[in-house]
Structures are given as structure tokens and as C-alpha cells.
Amino acid sequence: MRTLLCILALCLALPVAAQDDTPIPDRSATGGAQTLEDIMARQRGEQVAPKTGDAAGAARDLSGQLGTLGGASDPELWRQLRYGSADVTVSSGGEVASVLMQDGGMAWLEFRKGPLATYGGYLLLGTIALLAVFFVLRGRIRLDYEKTGRTVTRFKTFERAAHWLLAGSFILLGITGLLTLFGRMLIAPYISKEFNATLLMGSKFIHNNVAWAFIVALIVVFCLWVWHNIPNSTDITWFAQAGGIIGSKHPPAKKFNGGQKVIFWSVILLGASISLTGVSLLFPFEFPMFLKTFDILRSAGINELPFYGPLPTALAPHEEMQYAQAWHAIVAFVLMAIIFAHIYIGSVGMEGAYDAMGSGEVDEAWARQHHSLWLEELEEKAKAAPKDATPAE
Amino acid sequence: MKAMMMGFAALIVISVGAYFGLQELGFSTDARNAGATVRLD
């Protein structure tokens, strides 16, 4: 009987002895309470040493350091912080810095690296693929008439310089914008993080400063060509005949045909939208515009958007920035796709088209084929001018 | 080609001008978003 009791006592004591053998980690940072390593070890299913020291007393000491609220959780305070109604005082950064948390950040980040990058990338690659297929099927649009050797001035030097200012700045902004969006996905894993970081620093510098050149060019180009781009009845004929791009007909057109007007207004309207959101991003929190836009939409009876849901009625300053960035990128993707088509038709897609922006002089045969009404206007003006008159330039 | 070069030259002039102009006007990031207790450089 005594032997049996000894074996039973030994069995009961063994687990205690085993537990006591677990090494006690350094818990000085928590005053003997459990540490992060304890939690992780428990999750791994490992034996965790018991609490040591006066953990409760140490927690009391920590509470003292945290001020009047102590270490206790205060749901009301966290709720106020969560919804931006807490009375927060900060030493610098102004009103914006008093927003300690806002929950739009993750949704924005997920959208930026998910749908934005994915569908934006598909849009650009798809446009290039479509243009390549179109080129294979249609080929280059050739001149139907023999070149005359006589040229007419299509665009003056100042107009062409403004076009190239706009084009050059847009290409730089497009490349640096794409690097900023795709760098972490496509460059950092395959080349190096350091290379990507350097590239992004350069991209940001170029993007932020070249933006002003784009805005200036956009205004100049608008002033130069808006008069010629007001829609009129000839555009209907032009679109009805697909601009002569499909088929063999060449519909009459003034200085700008229907397709060019679409390009012009796309550049102006989408470019203006990109510029406004860009300025909002360049001066963070100074020009919030999305809540105001949502208010205008609501007053027009639009309370929700397709693929989005109800329009928000309140936005934290940081959410304004997130909306600005998302919209800036979406519109930029659309404009880039349109510009791909513009570059195509102005270079390999149409014989003689580049001359208009290259030398500014186009052959009369080209002008008659693509802008017959404009050429007729020029010829009438030439006839009306006195024969001994000296040309202005 | 001359017009293209003029456009690109204008691009450089406006961009560099904007960079230094905004610095002078106090619109750099540290000037706008940092207090006396925060140093970003």
C-alpha cells in the first residue's frame, strides 16, 4: 500500500517538476507579466513559463506613467479617435495631425495595389494590342492623291512648341506615375529594392515638378485651339464615315476633324481633372475637393455611384488625399490609353500626319484628303488677299 | 524639330522654375508640415 502511494505521488509531482523546468525568459520590460514571445510560444503550442514577480504591481506602475487614463482600455476614447471626434492636441502639423486614426487607408491601399494596378495595366496593354491588330488589318493610311510638292502651314512654331511641351510633360508624368504605381510590384522583386527606391525618389521629383509644365501647356493649348474644336455639323458626317480610317472614303473636315476634337476635349477635360487632383496632392490637405464634389452630386440627386455605393457624407483629411490619388490615377490611365491612339495615328498610322507637328507644313494633297474644308478656307483667303500684299510671315 | 526642342526647353525651364520658386515661397514639405520640434532633413 505504501509503495502504491509513493508511485501515485511521483506521478502527480512529475508534471509540476516538468513545468518548473521551463526556463523563465527575461520579462523585465513587462514587470513579470507575459511578453509577446510568451504569446507566440503559446500559439506554437510550446510550454510557457508561469508569470513571475509582481506583474499586477508592475502594471500599476505602467498605468501611472500613462497619465490619468492609466493602462485601462477606454472604449469611448477609442471610439472617439476612430470617428475623429476625440479632443486631440498635437504640438505640430496642425489640424491634420490631430487625426490619429482613420480607417480609409487600408481600403485605399487595397484598391491601389489591386483593381487600380490590375485593370489600369490591362487597359494600357489592351490598347497597345488593339492598335497593333488594327495596324496589321488596316495598314498605314496612305495618300490617295499624288503629292503636289506645294505645302500649307498647318501649325505655326508657337503652336507646335506648345504641343510638344504638353506631349513631353505628359510622357514624363506618365512614365514616372507608372513607376510609382508598379515599381514595388515589377521592379523591386526582380532588380532590387534599393534600385526601386532610387528610381522612385527620382520619379517623385520629376513628377512633382514637371506637373507645372503640363498645367501651363494645357492652358496654352486650350487657348490656342478651343475655337477650332467647337463641335459642328461636319463632325456628324465625319463620324458617320468613321473618319475614313475604316473604308476608303475621306469625309470633309475643317482644321480639326471629329476624331481630333475627341482627342482635344479628352486632353483638356481629363487633363484638367488630373491637374486639379494633382495640385491637391502636391499641397496635402490644403485643397480638399472630394467631399465638396460628393455634396454637389447629392444636391443633383445622385446619392450613390455604380460599382461604389452610397457617397460618403464626411471625409477625414487623409481620406480626401486617398480619393484624390485614386481619381488622379484612374483618369490618368484613361488619358494614357487615348494618347496611345493619338500617337499611333500621328506617327505610323497615317502617312504625312507627323509633318503637321514636325515641320508644321503639310502637302496640299494631304490637306485635301483629310481636311478639305480647311484647305478650301485657306484657298479662299489667299484669293481674297491683294496680290501685292506681303505675307505676315 | 526646332519647335519640339523649344517645347522641351520650356518644359525644363518651367519645371526648374517651379522647384526653386516653390522653395522660395516656403512650400517645401518641411516648411509646410513640420514644426520647430520636427526635423525632416
Image (tube, coloured by chain):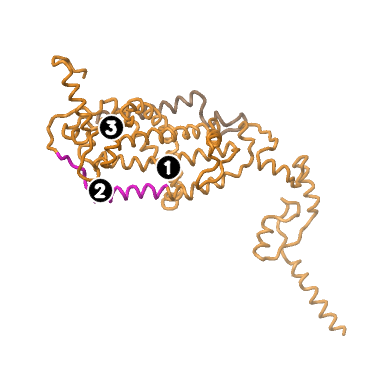
Chain colours: A orange, B brown
Q: Which residues are magenta?
A: A120-144
| Residue at the spot 17% in from the left edge and 25% down from the top edge | A379
Q: Which residue is mark 2?
A: A135
Q: Earlier in the sequence, mark 3 or mark 2?
A: 2
Is residue B19 found left or right of A234 in the rendered image?
Answer: right
Task: Give the amino acid type for the residue marked by disc 1 in the picture.
Answer: Leu
Q: Which chain is disc 1 placed on?
A: A
How far from the left and from the top, in percent, is residue A155? 25, 28
Circle 2 residues within 10 Å: few <14, some 14–19, many ≥20: some
Q: Which residue is mark 3?
A: A256
Q: What is the C-alpha distance between the residues marked 3 and 1? A: 39 Å
How far from the left and from the top, in percent, is residue A82? 66, 43
Q: Which chain is disc 2 placed on?
A: A
Which is more toward the observer, A380 or B37?
A380
Q: Which mark is residue A336?
A: none
Do we see residue B41 in this rendering? no
Q: Vertical placement of B25 versus A264: above or below?
A: above
Circle 3 residues within 10 Å: few <14, some 14–19, many ≥20: many
Q: Which mark is residue A199?
A: 1
Task: Give the amino acid type for the residue marked by disc 3 in the picture.
Answer: Phe
Give the secondary structure at mark 1.
helix
Q: Earlier in the sequence, mark 3 or mark 1?
A: 1
Q: What is the C-alpha distance between the residues marked 3 and 2? A: 23 Å
Which is more toward the observer, A335 or A265?
A265
